[in-house]
């Protein structure tokens, strides 16, 4: 059976950790801000310092990573770890750095989402397993 993303309120509640924030206002876009790459670089340095070599990949993604593009002022970061299902290896250190685990989707590549409200309202940290390393080990 192919994975289907959660669509109903009950399905979303099943993967969400903590209380959902009510978002009932307009979506606000901001003109490109040259500080966005600096915010990302600062967060990437903090994540590297927190996780060390457990952080296999850290990338700035989403609309704030595109120079000149208007965007929601939210820094999106992808973090790859060896096995994202092993939360104890990376979640507690990231929590000590201000991140909060918000979404756990084991059915979708063991996806996790952590948020840090201190960085541009929300800094979203998408956590994925480093699949290439798993494939290499299975050979």
Image (tube, grey):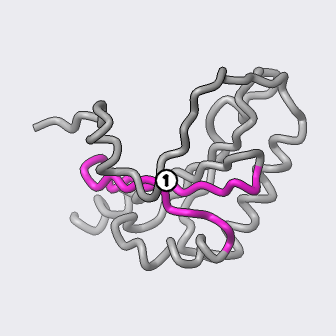
Q: Quadrant of the N terminus?
A: top left
The answer to which image quadrant residue 116 occupies is bottom right
Q: Position of residue 131 (x, y in %)?
A: 36, 56
Residue at 21% x, 38% y is 3
Residue at 77% x, 21% y is 70
The image shows residue 78, relative to residue 98, as above or below, that is above
The image shows residue 132, relative to residue 74, as above or below, that is below
Q: Position of residue 121 (x, y in %)?
A: 73, 46
Q: Which residues are magenta?
A: 97-119
Q: Quadrant of the C terminus?
A: bottom left
Residue closer to the observer: 136 or 77: 77
Q: Is residue 104 left or right of residue 35?
A: left
Count neighbours of disc 1 (C-alpha within 10 A) and say few if under 14, some if 14 to 19, many if 20 or more: many
Q: Position of residue 60 (x, y in %)?
A: 67, 44
Residue closer to the observer: 139 or 22: 22
Which residue bears the numbered disc 1? 113
Q: Is residue 130 left or right of residue 65?
A: left
Residue at 76% x, 52% y is 119
In the image, residue 19 lies in the stretch drawn in magenta: no
Count of marks overlaid on the render: 1
Farthest-out residue, right: 34
Q: Is residue 82 left or right of residue 9?
A: right
Residue closer to the observer: 58 or 5: 5
In the image, residue 109 lies in the stretch drawn in magenta: yes
Q: Is residue 122 left or right of residue 10?
A: right
The answer to which image quadrant residue 133 occupies is bottom left
Farthest-out residue, left: 1
Residue at 22% x, 65% y is 138
The kind of secondary structure element at disc 1 is strand
Q: Position of residue 78 (x, y in %)?
A: 56, 50
The image shows residue 41, relative to residue 97, as above or below, that is above
């Amino acid at each position: 059976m192919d994975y289907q993303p959660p669509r109903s309120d009950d399905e979303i509640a099943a993967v969400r950790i903590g209380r959902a924030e009510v978002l009932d206002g307009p979506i606000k876009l901001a003109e490109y801000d040259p500080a966005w790459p600096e915010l990302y670089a600062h967060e990437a340095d903090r994540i590297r310092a927190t996780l060390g070599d457990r952080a296999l990949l850290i990338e700035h993604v989403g609309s704030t990573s595109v120079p000149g593009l208007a965007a929601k002022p939210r820094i999106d970061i992808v973090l790859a770890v060896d096995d994202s299902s092993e939360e104890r290896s990376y979640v507690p250190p990231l929590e000590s750095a201000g991140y909060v685990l918000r979404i756990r989707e084991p059915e979708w590549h063991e996806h996790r989402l952590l948020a840090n409200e201190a960085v541009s309202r929300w800094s979203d940290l998408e956590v994925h397993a480093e699949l290439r390393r798993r494939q290499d080990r299975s050979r």
